[in-house]
Image (cartoon, rainbow, N blue to C red):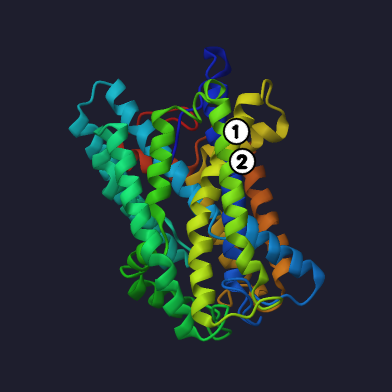
Amino acid sequence: MKVTLHSQKDGKAKRALSLDLARGAMLLLIALAHAPLYLYTSEPGIMQRVEAVNSFDQIVNLIGLFLIDNRARAMFAVLLGYGFVLAYESQLSRGKTEKAAIKTIRRRSWYLILFGVFLAVIIGGQDILMAYGIAGLIVCGLLKRKIKTLIRTFVFITLFYAATVPIAWGFNMQEIGGYGFPPEVSATDTYLDTAFAALLSFPITPLLIYIMFPILPSVLLGMWMAKYRLLTEPEQRLKTLYVMTFTGLSVSLAGALPLSLLGTVWHPGFFTAGVMNGLHILTGIAGGLAYAALFGIIGAKVVVPGRFTLSLSALGKRSLTFYIWNEAMLVLLLSPAALDLGGKVSNGMVAVIAVLVWLFSLLLATVLEKQHLNGPMEVLLRKLVYKNKQKKPPGGS
């Protein structure tokens, strides 16, 4: 998940800035996507969005449907795929063989899965690390292949998902018998109940994610972007990035439009609603790609990073640490097994809580950056993967 952000002296800081800014912003989108899942007293609305009780809730739900849901996950996957290529090339530049470099990526992926198990079972958070660790195991063999092979693999997998995901969601929503999902938590949940349930379900959850959510296409797109250095040398490909941003956002917004009409001006059957959710998920791939490309443009345009830019970059360099931290804070604040705010607030207020959690992580990351300290999860992952205690600068590979 990490990429070296070189010092200003070597002239390469701006090249890595796009990635770190994207990762920092990604954490906000993920927090906003996961926070509503703890609202167990609210009536189901549209898919994972609960029913709005005031105009602010309605605005938050619309923003979520158009810009966040199924888009934050895709952006995470794009950046993950980009990181796989950079990590692989970094190993080769240090004299490692292709086989040894791929072995390192594979070992890193296994540890991501382990971190995901810790997050889901011990912390009780909403985990996607397990699924992305599995993605690393699946795609690592493509790292040494040519771009044509990468593109063909992407086309094949994307066509498969395009043919299956809408139908799978159609039957799923028909089984649920509504436009929205029932709450994942309840007022009687305790820590032990949650931990035991997560312990039983964690081997199955990644499999269900791969059936219902197309992660691999986004990872492959990230790998494709890395082959052309679209985020590490964005100034060389600005025209491409503009086209990707405009096209991706257009597809993403168009794909979200049907869900925004559900239950208000449009009342289709549950199967049709599920198909529309599948379309929402598929077009989210374009949205995640557009978000990544947008930060490539931003990184290319930044000449002298300001205070907020540096803080956001510091957060992005420690994205693994603060992804886990943010999930832990959401559990602490919202879960019925902890402070239980999820049973007392509406969708609008829980979005405010998510933003505050993210802002606090932004502050902590800034403090770590000023102290020249890595994120503890990044330090631990490096020690586990590389099996040494060599000190490296914050954000180093």
Pick the front one: 32 or 276? 276
Crowding around mark 1 (Cα neighbors within 10 Å: few <14, some 14 to 19, many 20+) is some
Could you say whether the residue bearing mark 1 is in a helix, strand or loop?
helix
Pick the front one: 191 or 350? 350
**Image quarter (top left, top right, bottom left or bottom right) of the C terminus:** top left
Left/right placement of residue 112 relative to residue 103 reads right
Q: Which quadrant would residue 49 be assigned to in this image?
A: bottom right
Left/right placement of residue 91 relative to residue 29 reads left
Query: In the image, residue 68 lies at what x, y percent?
Result: 61, 57
* Residue at the image position 23 percent from the left and 25 percent from the top: 96
Query: In the image, residue 309 lies at what x, y percent?
Result: 67, 33
Vertically, is 335 above or below 256?
Answer: below
User: What residue would you read off at disc 2?
Assistant: 246
Instruction: Kindly check if marks 2 and 1 are in contact, taking CB atoms under 8 A apart as contact.
Output: yes
Query: In the image, residue 200 lies at what x, y percent?
Result: 33, 75
Q: Which quadrant would residue 371 be assigned to in this image?
A: top right
Name the amino acid, label 2. Answer: Phe
Q: Looking at the image, can residue 314 be seen?
A: no
Q: Which quadrant would residue 46 be assigned to in this image?
A: bottom right
User: What residue would you read off at disc 1?
Assistant: 242
Query: In the image, residue 138 lies at what x, y percent?
Result: 27, 49
Name the amino acid, label 1. Answer: Tyr
Could you say whether the residue bearing mark 2 is in a helix, strand or loop?
helix
* Residue at the image position 51 percent from the left and 27 percent from the top: 5
**Image quarter (top left, top right, bottom left or bottom right) of the N terminus:** top left
Farthest residue toward the right? 55
* Residue at the image position 27 percent from the left and 42 percent from the top: 140
Left/right placement of residue 224 relative to residue 358 reads left
Pick the front one: 77 or 319? 77
Vertically, is 237 above or below 328?
Answer: above
Pick the front one: 1 or 300? 300
Q: Separation of disc 2 and disc 1 at Cα?
A: 6 Å
